[in-house]
């Protein structure tokens, strides 16, 4: 996550616009548990799935069971990511991410990033990403 003061004005403006559009989506989120391990829990926001033709976007939340220190003064307890899935192909890409100081996306936003040139990655059949893709693409 890039939080350096060297963000260009254009990138900051883009980020502000993105957050203005996406913030209502994250505030109204209804997180459904998807899975967990000893390090984190994964949730999906099924309420605000956005479809555009064969492409679907869904917010995913990774909620850590222990603090993640990004530096000596910055702790992250949860990360939200906006993932886009191709419903006709086994591929996905990460469009944006936000890190928070508390679990379940609470507290202060510690950093955020919009991926300018998000690259498609293949999705392995039967993987967690495949489960998310199936859920997101099944939404009418």
Image (cartoon, helix red, strand yellow):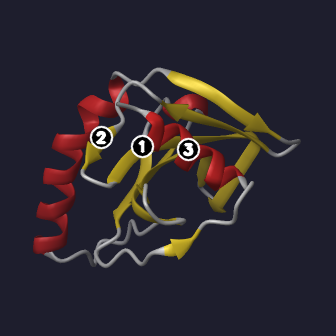
Q: Secondary structure at mark 1?
A: strand
Residue at the (59%, 55%) spot, across then down:
73
Residue 118 is marked as none
Residue assigned mark 3 = 134
Inspect this view and state whether residue 78 appears. no
Q: Separation of disc 1 and disc 2 at Cα?
A: 7 Å
Q: Separation of disc 3 and disc 2 at Cα?
A: 14 Å
Q: Earlier in the sequence, mark 1 or mark 2?
A: 2
Residue at the (11%, 72%) spot, across then down:
9
53 left or right, relative to 91: left
Residue assigned mark 1 = 58
Q: Separation of disc 1 and disc 3 at Cα?
A: 11 Å
Inspect this view and state whether residue 116 appears. yes
Q: Nearer the viewer, mark 1 or mark 3?
A: 3
54 left or right, relative to 60: left
Q: Earlier in the sequence, mark 1 or mark 3?
A: 1
Residue assigned mark 2 = 50
Q: How many marks?
A: 3
Question: What x and y, as percent, mark residue 37?
Answer: 85, 42
- Taking 125 as reference, is 78 above or below it? above
Give yes or no for contact between labels 1 and 2 (Cβ–Cβ under 8 Å): yes
Residue at the (48%, 66%) spot, across then down:
89
Q: Earlier in the sequence, mark 3 or mark 2?
A: 2
Image quadrant holding the C terminus, namely top left
- Taking 51 as reference, is 140 above or below it? above
Q: Within 10 Å of the Cα at label 3, are there few (<14), some (14-19), or many (20+) other Cα atoms?
A: few
Q: Secondary structure at mark 3?
A: helix
Question: What x and y, as percent, mark residue 1?
Answer: 47, 66
């Amino acid at each position: 996550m890039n939080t350096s003061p060297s963000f260009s004005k254009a990138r900051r403006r883009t980020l502000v616009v993105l957050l203005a559009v996406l913030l209502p989506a994250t505030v109204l989120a209804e997180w459904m548990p998807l899975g967990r391990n000893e390090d984190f829990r994964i949730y999906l926001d099924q309420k605000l799935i956005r479809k555009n033709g064969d492409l679907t976007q869904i917010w995913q939340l990774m909620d850590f069971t222990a603090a993640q220190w990004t530096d000596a003064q910055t702790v992250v307890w949860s990360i939200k990511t906006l993932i886009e899935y191709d419903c006709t192909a086994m591929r996905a890409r990460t469009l944006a991410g936000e890190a928070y100081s508390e679990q379940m996306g609470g507290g202060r936003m510690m950093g955020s990033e919009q991926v300018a040139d998000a690259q498609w990655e293949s999705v392995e059949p039967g993987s967690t990403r495949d489960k998310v893709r199936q859920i997101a693409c099944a939404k009418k």
